[in-house]
Image (cartoon, rainbow, N blue to C red):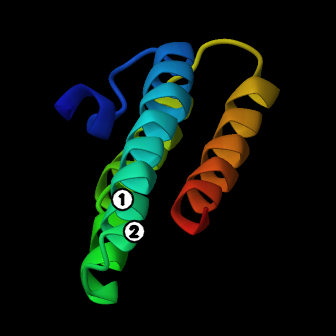
Amino acid sequence: MTALWTGRLPLPRAFWQYGVFYMALANLGATVIALSALSADLPAALVVGIFLLPAPYIFVAVVGVWRSADSYDGPPHWATLARIAALVWGVFMVLL
């Protein structure tokens, strides 16, 4: 996780593995658990808390992709697109 946060991972790995796959997996898991808690008539505050549990990871993943893009040696447009996509995907994952 430290390598992700500091941007020491290659951009493709940071983006696809941590920024897309793990972020979606964490969000899906939290959503399923939150919906289960909702159907069990648990307090709404607890349901919202469960739903927002992946938010810190999402923040770390977006920052990690952003920092990995800083050291990307390929065409600069890929680094820019990765930054934009990670930010949009992160916001989408928090709101969905």
For the point 31% across and 79% down, which residue is it? Answer: 41
Task: Give the camera-side residue of 7 and 58.
Answer: 58
Task: Give the camera-side residue of 37 and 48.
Answer: 37
Instruction: Work out whether 89 lies above or below 37.
Output: above
For residue 36, which numbered disc appears in the image?
1
Q: Secondary structure at mark 1?
A: helix
Q: Are marks 2 and 1 in contact (CB under 8 Å)?
A: yes
Q: Secondary structure at mark 2?
A: helix
The quadrant in which residue 36 appears is: bottom left
Instruction: Work out whether 24 lies above or below 75.
Output: below
For the point 81% across and 29% down, which residue is it? Answer: 77
Residue assigned mark 2? 39
- Residue 55 visible in rendering: no
Q: What kind of residue is marked 1? A: Ser
- x then y, percent, for residue 4: 31, 31
For the point 42% across and 30% down, which residue is it? Answer: 22
Q: Residue furthest left?
A: 2
Q: CA distance from mark 2 to mark 1?
A: 5 Å
Decide if residue 69 is on the left or right side of residue 45.
right
The quadrant in which residue 20 appears is: top right
The quadrant in which residue 64 appears is: top left
Quadrant assignment for the N terminus:
top left
- x then y, percent, for residue 93: 56, 55
- Residue 79 visible in rendering: yes
